[in-house]
Amino acid sequence: MNTNIKFLLIALGITVISVLFTGMLLNGTFETFDNVINDFLTSIRTPFVEQMMIAITALGGTKVSFILTVAAIGTLLYKKRFYLNFLLINAMGGGVIITYIIKKAVARERIAETAYMNIWGFFTDRISYSYPSGHSVKALLFFAIIAYFIYLEVDDKKLKGLGIFIASLTTLLIGLGQVILERHYITDVIGGFLIALAWVALCIAFTGPLIRWVWDKFSLNFKRSIEKLVSLW
């Protein structure tokens, strides 16, 4: 089976699971689960753990994730990995839009006080709802692309495994940190991971064919333009 088709099927499958999960969430199915897990994770919070989680979860914040994305784009351009560059831009850009739409649609109240958006001083009057966790979405999207890059580019199996493990662990800690710091329910994090997984799989399925289609169109139009110029002579 074609790789793009595989990722498309994965994206569709996770999307179905995500929709079902969100529906169950809205029906209050996970209320007890949320309370039990959140109570447990907040119980292990110490001053040291708190400071460590603040530092780790900052990686999933809007400003830091933007800086990391720009740095990754620059690195990929330098290495001439244009496919991965388009993939990263599509994943992160689309992920932010999807997260905002779902937050507005579900409108789940925060576990603590109401939070507001703050993108370098803009949109500060707009409520940032709880579901899904934006940190979790951005973290999984970014580190999934990094893990995919490591999978494609690193030949040494041990280094490849270590790199993917670190990317996965960082993503998990960012999500759990949001719960430990009492910023989100555990289901906000799980929902964010599901949404991000579905979107990144869809991006992998379509980015390659989209680039080829655009390039073919550009090449064809460029060729026709040259032919017209030549015919004028």
Image (cartoon, helix red, strand yellow):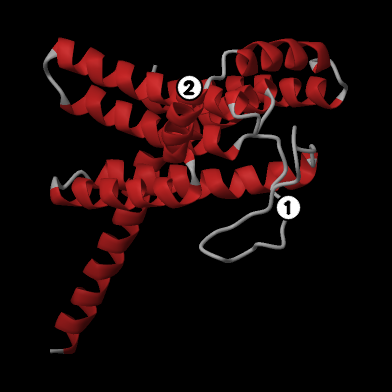
Outermost residue toward the bottom in this view: 233
Reading the image, the residue beneath label 2 is 49
Task: Count the marks.
Answer: 2
- Residue drawn at x 65%, y 10% as measured from the top left: 40
Reply above or below: 123 against 98. Answer: below
Q: Secondary structure at mark 2?
A: helix
> In terms of sequence position, does the residue under pointer 1 or pointer 2 come before the other?
2
The image quadrant of residue 168 is top left
Reply above or below: 79 against 41. Answer: below
Left or right: 183, with 110 as reference point: left
Please name the amino acid that badge 1 sits on: Ile
The percent position of residue 2, horizontal first and vertical second, equals 37, 22
The percent position of residue 212, horizontal first and vertical second, equals 32, 47
State the residue in front, 121 or 133: 121
Task: Quadrant for the C terminus, please.
Answer: bottom left
Left or right: 122, with 188 as reference point: left
Left or right: 201, with 98 as reference point: left
Is residue 2 visible to the viewer in this orientation of the structure? no
Reading the image, the residue beneath label 1 is 127
Please name the amino acid that badge 2 sits on: Val
- Residue drawn at x 40%, y 33% as measured from the top left: 204
Reply above or below: 119 against 177. Answer: below
Marks 1 and 2 in Cβ contact (< 8 Å): no
- Residue drawn at x 31%, y 20% as measured from the top left: 166
Q: Secondary structure at mark 1?
A: loop
Task: Quadrant for the N terminus, please.
Answer: top left
Q: Disc 1 versus disc 2: distance between alpha carbons?
A: 28 Å
